[in-house]
Image: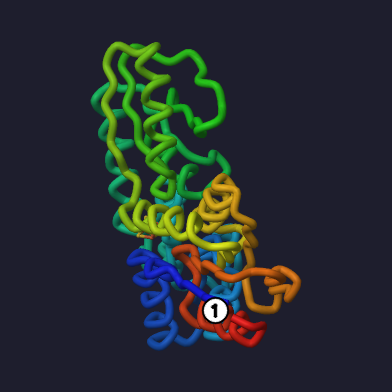
Amino acid sequence: MKIIAAKTAGFCFGVKRAVDMAFKTAKKKQKGIFTLGPIIHNPQVIEKLKQEGILPIEDITTPGIKDIIIRTHGIPLQVMDRISEAGFNIIDATCPFVKKAQHYAKLLREEGYQVIILGDREHPEVQGLMSYAGDDAIVVDSESALPKIKHNVGIVVQTTQPVEALKKLFSRVIEQAKNVKVYNTICSSTALRLKETAAMAKKVDIMLVVGGKNSANTTQLAKLCRSLSVPTYHVETDAELIPEWLNNVKSVGITAGASTPDWIIEDIIKKVREMGG
Ligand code: SF4
């Protein structure tokens, strides 16, 4: 059985930067370090950070806070203001690409455009973007119907969306709006990962997609593979692998989300080898 691992699998620039920042902070300081929400969407990495004394919290009223690390997906502007006012030390690990999307959302609002955010409204990155985009901003995903929009609209995109979703949205927006300004804020790391995964999925018998079940870009990879009719299994660790998946399989493709550490990918490859790969 042949195993093909994606070159793009594993930590992207933004996640690596955030995790490095967190570990560096843990080395310098002894306690009182918290992340507002999980710093990245990977439960195993969050567990490692906890062992270093960095704990995720959901609000800033938790006793004992000294330092707050802002996660890669960013946080709403109002929450950032509250943290500053409370006097905590802020270590901002928001990915620079997410910051860019926040900047464009704000710019569009200031220029008088109604902002349309393409993404998942429940995702922390999108919730952060909404706080920059103004009261009349709307969030749409690639499937949902477009509500009535204004004549001047601006589009920004959750960094992990596929470009096809943006193309679809644009074609629907121009049916209603007169002026449309688009900032393609899709991160190139996401686009490359999706491209390589699609090419791989067409060549193999099954795909293993590795990463947090709560990770948007990992889920996106699994969705893409399934849309290409390849049997696809989304796993977080090697413990979830089931030998029957490999019955009559000649080739296995392995890809992973941007928040999946190398050690988890290596464990998966090792286990697939032991299972006959
Ligand atoms: S996927 Fe892109 S936008 Fe998201 S954290 Fe990584 S580099 Fe930043």
Instruction: Identify which amino acid the numbered label 1 is placed on.
Output: Ile
Locate residue 131, reporting x and y percent: 43, 39
Q: Which residue is mark 1?
A: 264
Element type where label 1 sits in the image: helix
Locate residue 76, reporting x and y percent: 45, 46
Residue 204 makes an appearance in the image: yes
Q: Using the rendered view, name the quadrant where residue 108 is placed.
A: top left
Q: Using the rendered view, name the quadrant where residue 239 is placed.
A: bottom right
Locate residue 232, reporting x and y percent: 62, 58
Q: Quadrant of the N terminus?
A: bottom right
Q: Residue at x 27, y 16 (%)?
A: 179
Structural crowding at the residue carrying mark 1, measured as other residues with C-alpha within 10 Å and reported as few (<14), some (14–19) or many (≥20): some
Q: Nearer the viewer, residue 90 or 259?
A: 259
Q: Residue at x 45, y 67 (%)?
A: 68
From the viewer's perspective, is residue 36 above or below residue 109?
Answer: below
Q: Residue at x 38, y 87 (%)?
A: 28
Q: Residue at x 57, y 85 (%)?
A: 270
Q: Nearer the viewer, residue 194 or 151?
A: 194
Left or right position of 193 against 35: left
